[in-house]
Image (cartoon, rainbow, N blue to C red):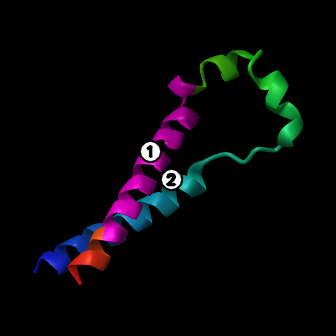
Amino acid sequence: MLNKLISIIFILVCVFLTTVVLFQEGNEQGLGSIGGIADTYWGKNRGRSVEGLLEKLTKVAAALFLILSLVLNIVK
């Protein structure tokens, strides 16, 4: 019973993680923009934007993905 519940949660986290990653914008400017991005208004307030929220959600979903995959291997 516990294995099935964790498996369902794992599948939901996988779908959520895929969706959040697909919603993120690409980095069109490449590595050359690393020095100049901090000077822009968007660079300074990136954490408060939608893109910043998507990055935080990606980190949380990735952590849940790793933890659930470990738990599923142990519970087998």
**Would residue 3 appear left or right of 59 to someone viewing this image?**
left
Which of the 4 quarters of the picture holds residue 36? top right
Across and down, in percent, residue 6 comes to 22, 71
**Would residue 72 appear left or right of 43 to someone viewing this image?**
left
Furthest toward the bottom, the residue is 76
Q: CA distance from mark 1 to mark 2?
A: 7 Å
Q: Which mark is residue 8?
A: none
Q: Is residue 6 visible?
A: yes
Which of the 4 quarters of the picture holds residue 62? bottom left
Circle 1 crowding by C-alpha within 10 Å: few under 14, some 14–19, many from 20? some
Q: Which residues are magenta?
A: 47-70
Q: Amino acid at mark 1?
A: Leu
Q: Report if residue 73 lies within the magenta region.
A: no
Q: Earlier in the sequence, mark 1 or mark 2?
A: 2
Residue at image coords 53%, 41%: 55
Q: Is residue 29 visible?
A: no
Across and down, in percent, residue 12 comes to 33, 66
Across and down, in percent, residue 28 comes to 82, 44
Across and down, in percent, residue 33 comes to 84, 32
Q: Which residue is mark 2?
A: 20
Q: Which mark is residue 57?
A: 1
Circle 2 crowding by C-alpha within 10 Å: few under 14, some 14–19, many from 20? some
Assign the magenta stretch its main secondary structure. helix
Q: Are marks 1 and 2 in contact (CB under 8 Å)?
A: yes
Q: Nearer the viewer, mark 1 or mark 2?
A: 1
User: Vertical placement of 76 versus 66: above or below?
Assistant: below
**Would residue 7 appear left or right of 23 to someone viewing this image?**
left
Please, what secondary structure does the residue beneath circle 1 have?
Answer: helix
Q: Report if residue 48 lies within the magenta region.
A: yes
Residue at image coords 54%, 26%: 47
Please, what secondary structure does the residue beneath circle 2 have?
Answer: helix
